[in-house]
């Protein structure tokens, strides 16, 4: 058992803390938000993430997991301290390291000799050196251990990962961090800090490229009369390609892909390389947003002005309540800009909260959201939408039209009711 402190109880910090406790470590999670700490200490998890509630409850019950606002008390005598603080992006694509820098500066005088500080936040290449300088401790080392957690499956991703990456300049630090995962069955990549930091950005850049490729091929399929589902099936069996991240959709987004892609492009530019390849993937994504809006525009007769659009799904994907950089909201904004009225339902959004536009009406029921609508647009792939009765939906709409940007619904039952039904790449 190793004593661990987690600085920050956001998505990454909370999941990491609860999972390390499950692995048998003694974990103290530190956050400046007193209300949040009080809720977590009572077992009230503020985010939607499968299995996380039970894991936090288990950790609290065993005494291996606790939450505090006292940084000094939280890191006292801790062998490993993880930095899991926000790293938002600036308008130019660079990463705002102010939270990391503030945390490192405050930790310096508080750490026990021999402690290993670990960057788990997604940070620009070279941040390990920045943290070392701000800690100003010769008896403390810094390592990189990037996270590869997908929202909606983060607990499984942590406990059953594809790989574990550890970057440090000395063997001892690498071994300390690696040993935290002794009970996890996964390949371990031991490398230097710069390579570990680059692996995270490179992985996300490759994934967004696959997603943009799938959306571009879907557009081709629509033009030539091919079926994207069959095309992706044929591609996915190729071991050199794989089926993951080839499913088309309204565009990609979320808390990581957009900002990490912009950050890598910015870093590449600083290093003297024009990363046009990744620029193209971002441009395809913007085109995809507009393609989806065009589908809606055609479904209502060519003009969005004054039309009522029912929207199913606002989060950036199913299995999470995260709205950050949601492609659904990107499309919602464009529909509103075209003059449409929006009525929306999402299983995790019971009341208005940023960044949902003020003009969007929210409803607790998917059928009610469709009342008097000219078109239903599916923007998030929530499984519960599949079981909604098409007859009940069509009965409350003024026009029979569906645009399914996730290829979630079966077109047959809707078309049998006289609905115009359009998916992506079909």
Image (cartoon, rainbow, N blue to C red):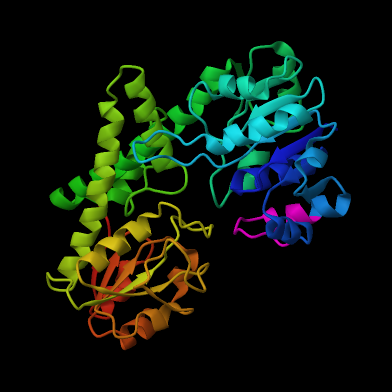
Magenta stretch? 44-57
What residue lies at 33% left-to-right and 44% top-to-bottom?
A: 232
Residue 192 point in image, percent of width and height: 58, 15
In the image, farthest residue toward the bottom: 395
Can residue 180 be seen here? The reply is no
Relative to residue 169, is residue 283 drawn left or right?
left
Q: What residue lies at 52% left-to-right and 25% top-to-bottom?
A: 197
Residue 388 colored in magenta in the image? no
- What residue appears at the point 64 percent right and 17 percent down from the top-left corner? 168
Q: Position of residue 106 (x, y in %)?
A: 69, 34
Q: Where residue 118 appears, x then y in whole percent?
A: 66, 28
Location of residue 104 (image quadrant): top right
Comparing 54 with 17, the one in front is 17
Q: Is residue 256 left or right of residue 24?
A: left
Q: x, y (%) of residue 323?
A: 46, 57
- Image quarter hosting the N terminus: top right
Residue 52 painted magenta: yes
Q: Quadrant of the C terminus?
A: bottom left
Q: Quadrant of residue 313?
A: bottom left
Q: Is residue 184 above or below residue 41?
A: above
Q: Nearer the viewer, residue 3 or 186?
A: 3
Q: Is residue 301 above or below residue 265?
A: below
Residue 125 appears in view: yes
């Amino acid at each position: 058992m190793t004593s661990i402190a987690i600085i920050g109880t956001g998505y990454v910090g909370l999941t990491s803390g609860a999972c390390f406790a499950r692995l048998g470590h003694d974990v103290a999670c530190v956050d400046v938000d007193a209300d949040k700490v009080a809720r977590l200490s009572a077992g009230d998890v503020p985010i939607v993430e499968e299995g996380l509630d039970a894991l936090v409850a288990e950790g609290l019950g065993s005494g291996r997991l606790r939450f505090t606002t006292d940084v000094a008390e939280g890191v006292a005598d801790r062998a490993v301290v993880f930095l899991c603080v926000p790293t938002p992006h600036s308008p130019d694509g660079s990463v705002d390291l102010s939270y990391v820098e503030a945390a490192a500066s405050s930790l310096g005088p508080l750490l026990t000799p021999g402690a290993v500080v670990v960057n788990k936040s997604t940070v620009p290449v070279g941040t390990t050196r920045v943290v070392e300088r701000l800690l100003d401790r010769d008896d403390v080392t810094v390592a990189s251990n990037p996270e590869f957690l997908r929202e909606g499956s983060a607990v499984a991703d942590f406990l059953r990962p594809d790989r574990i990456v550890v970057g440090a300049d000395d063997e001892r630090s690498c071994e300390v961090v690696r040993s935290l995962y002794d009970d996890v069955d996964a390949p371990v990549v031991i490398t230097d800090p710069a390579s570990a930091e680059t692996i995270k950005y490179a992985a996300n850049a490759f994934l967004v490229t696959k997603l943009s490729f799938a959306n571009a091929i879907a557009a081709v399929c629509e033009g030539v009369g091919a079926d994207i589902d069959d095309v992706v099936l044929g591609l996915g069996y190729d071991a050199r390609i794989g089926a993951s991240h080839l499913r088309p959709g309204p565009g990609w987004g979320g808390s990581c892909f957009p900002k990490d892609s912009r950050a890598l492009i910015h870093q590449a530019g600083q290093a003297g390389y024009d990363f046009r390849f990744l620029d193209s993937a971002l441009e395809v994504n913007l085109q995809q947003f507009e393609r989806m809006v065009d589908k809606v525009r055609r479904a209502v007769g060519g003009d969005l002005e004054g039309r009522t659009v029912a929207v199913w799904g606002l989060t950036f994907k199913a299995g999470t309540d995260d709205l950050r950089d949601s492609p659904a909201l990107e499309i919602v904004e464009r529909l509103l800009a075209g003059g449409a009225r929006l009525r929306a339902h999402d299983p995790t959004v019971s009341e208005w909260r940023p960044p949902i536009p003020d003009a969007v009406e929210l409803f607790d029921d998917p059928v009610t959201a469709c009342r008097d609508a000219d078109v239903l647009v599916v923007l998030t792939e929530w499984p519960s939408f599949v079981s909604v009765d098409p007859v009940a939906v069509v009965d409350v709409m003024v026009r029979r039209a569906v645009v399914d940007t996730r290829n979630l619904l079966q077109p047959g039952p809707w078309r049998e009711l006289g609905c115009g039904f359009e998916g992506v790449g079909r």
